[in-house]
Image: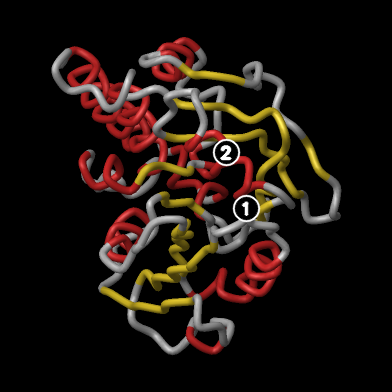
Amino acid sequence: MSNLVTVITAVHGPAAGYLADAYKSLCEQEMPVGWDWEWIIQEDGETEEVRPYVPDDVRISFGQGRHGRAGMARTLGLARAKGEFVKVLDADDMLTPGCLARDIAALTGQSGAAWTTSRVLDLLPDGSTVGFDQDPPEGTIERGEVLAHWKAHDYRAQVHPATLCVRRELLLAVGGWMALPASEDTGLLMALNAVSRGWFSAETGLLYRKWPGQSTSHAAHVQEGERAARMAVIEQRARVLLSLEGWQYGTA
């Protein structure tokens, strides 16, 4: 179905209580005329912990699957996607007003962008917010640009993968999210940047919640051996894709 944005959320039990805030942020989106959204919520596992928190809305599809981390859950949810564009929304995060309209404008405009990202504010437990000091200027992101910055800044990209909105056919073409225990969204971002042009919106598009239960706060996330392996395979895949001159999407 065209004129539809599919929002995909992977969720597990500890984060299920935040779905109400994510849903509220979706309902507050003012969509362009003729556009709507659908929300695919995919539980990472098959428990009874998440379903009670899923809102009652015909635009929402809830699914479950074997535990395999967020990347696998999102990719399983992708099978139900009908939208022309796919927007990432983590269960504990919130979109800001106008975010989806800005994504749609960038992807349907003259930029040649196949994916979009936006400014992020970290939402701290006390309700305060903190911005990022390396945001690029608003506009086009050329092929390989994110990869180069990421490599030069200790594997920290200048745009946040939790804000991605991407053409569904391109997302399918690169295989969805990487099969990694973490950084699977970074792997996707690098692959998209290797084969296509993107767009960055300088307006804040996401409130990224910081709380003790999120996976990036666990010690395992920064365990050096695993982190090095994750970064290595992400970089290797992106560089191979970047080198394949016949493997480009759109006008990139």
Nearer the observer, 3 or 153: 3
Q: Position of residue 201 (x, y in %)?
A: 63, 30
Question: For residue 119, which quarter of the picture?
Answer: top right
Nearer the observer, 65 or 223: 65
The kind of residue on which mark 2 rests is: Ala
Q: Looking at the picture, does residue 45 appear above or below residue 29?
A: below
Question: For residue 47, which quarter of the picture?
Answer: bottom left
Lateral position of residue 159 relative to residue 83, left or right: right
State the residue position of label 1.
32
Tell me the crowding category of disc 1: few under 14, some 14 to 19, or many 20 or more residues within 10 angstroms, Cα based.
Answer: some
Q: Looking at the picture, does residue 251 appear above or below residue 7?
A: above
Residue at 17% across, 13% down: 245
Is residue 180 visible in this depiction of the protein?
Answer: no
Is residue 172 visible in this depiction of the protein?
Answer: yes
Q: Secondary structure at mark 1?
A: loop
Label whose residue precedes the other's in the sequence (2 or 1) = 1
Residue at 50% across, 83% down: 58
Nearer the observer, 163 or 52: 163
Q: Looking at the picture, does residue 62 appear above or below residue 140?
A: below
Nearer the observer, 78 or 246: 246
Asked if the residues shown at circle 2 and circle 1 are in contact, with their CB atoms under 8 angstroms apart, the answer is yes
Q: CA distance from mark 2 to mark 1?
A: 9 Å
Lateral position of residue 222 relative to residue 71, left or right: right
Q: Looking at the picture, does residue 250 appear above or below residue 98?
A: above
Q: Position of residue 174 (x, y in %)?
A: 23, 39
State the residue position of label 2.
105
Tell me the crowding category of disc 2: few under 14, some 14 to 19, or many 20 or more residues within 10 angstroms, Cα based.
Answer: few
Residue at 37% across, 34% down: 227
